Image (cartoon, grey):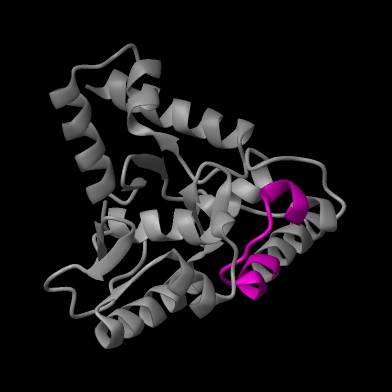
Amino acid sequence: SDRLRSQTLGLLEAFHAENPLRGGISREELRSRVGNAQERVFTQLLTALEAEGVVKSERDQVWLGSHRIRLSPDQERVVKGLEADFRAAGAAPPSPEEALGRLGVKGTEKHELFQVLVADRTLLRVKESLFFHAEALRTIQEQLVALLRQKKEIGPADFKDLFGVSRKYAIPLMEYFDAQRVTVRVGERRVLREGHGRVDNPGSGA
């Protein structure tokens, strides 16, 4: 209905005004804010609005087509600094607190500037507060697959040697690649999952 349409667009405008650094709102949150519209009716409305280019969505996030995250020069400096820090750190990234602290910002992974990089999938969560740069994960995956083709199976010690990292990083990474269906755990060791002939984008599975 027109009322639901104007309500939905009004809520999206208000959400962006209150949260200028967030890309979008979750579908469910938006639906609950418009008085828990019927799922079918709400889905039809979003589909129509997307076809018109008025809203956009990806996964479970919805935003106005006109919305752009605009950073101040100082915010831009922090976001670029975080991105560079995690990229350079490779297989041994800092904690969100450490990375923000180096840039003179106090905060955790919940900090809105850190979340800018999580939302656009530049930084991917491997475990709790452990985040890796997406490119670093891609490189690690390529090297891991190459090593497994050569050795057939590896354990935590091989993983630590290959990437020069401690168990603090090696174990969560090994578990991450199991979850991404790259490897299969056999006891304490890992083998390449059958049919894993190509390197997918990290984060695209599971």
Predominant secondary structure, magenta span:
helix
- Which quadrant of the figure contains the N terminus? top left
Figure label count: 0
Q: Is residue 132 above or below residue 152?
A: above
- Residue 150 is situated, as x and y percent measured from the top left of the image, at 28, 88
Q: Is residue 130 above or below residue 89?
A: above
Residue lying at the far right of the rendered structure? 104
Q: Nearer the viewer, residue 66 or 105?
A: 105
- Residue 162 is situated, as x and y percent measured from the top left of the image, at 49, 79
* Part of the protein shown in magenta: 85-99
* Residue 142 among those drawn in magenta: no
- Residue 175 is situated, as x and y percent measured from the top left of the image, at 37, 54
- Residue 178 is situated, as x and y percent measured from the top left of the image, at 30, 57
* Residue 90 among those drawn in magenta: yes
Q: Quadrant of residue 192?
A: bottom left
Tell me if 78 is positioned left or right of 147 in this view: right
**Residue at (24, 79) in percent of width and height:** 152
Residue lying at the far bottom of the rendered structure? 150
**Residue at (82, 51) in percent of width and height:** 101
Residue 182 seen in this snapshot: no
Residue 184 seen in this snapshot: yes
**Residue at (54, 28) in percent of width and height:** 14
Q: Quadrant of residue 189?
A: bottom left
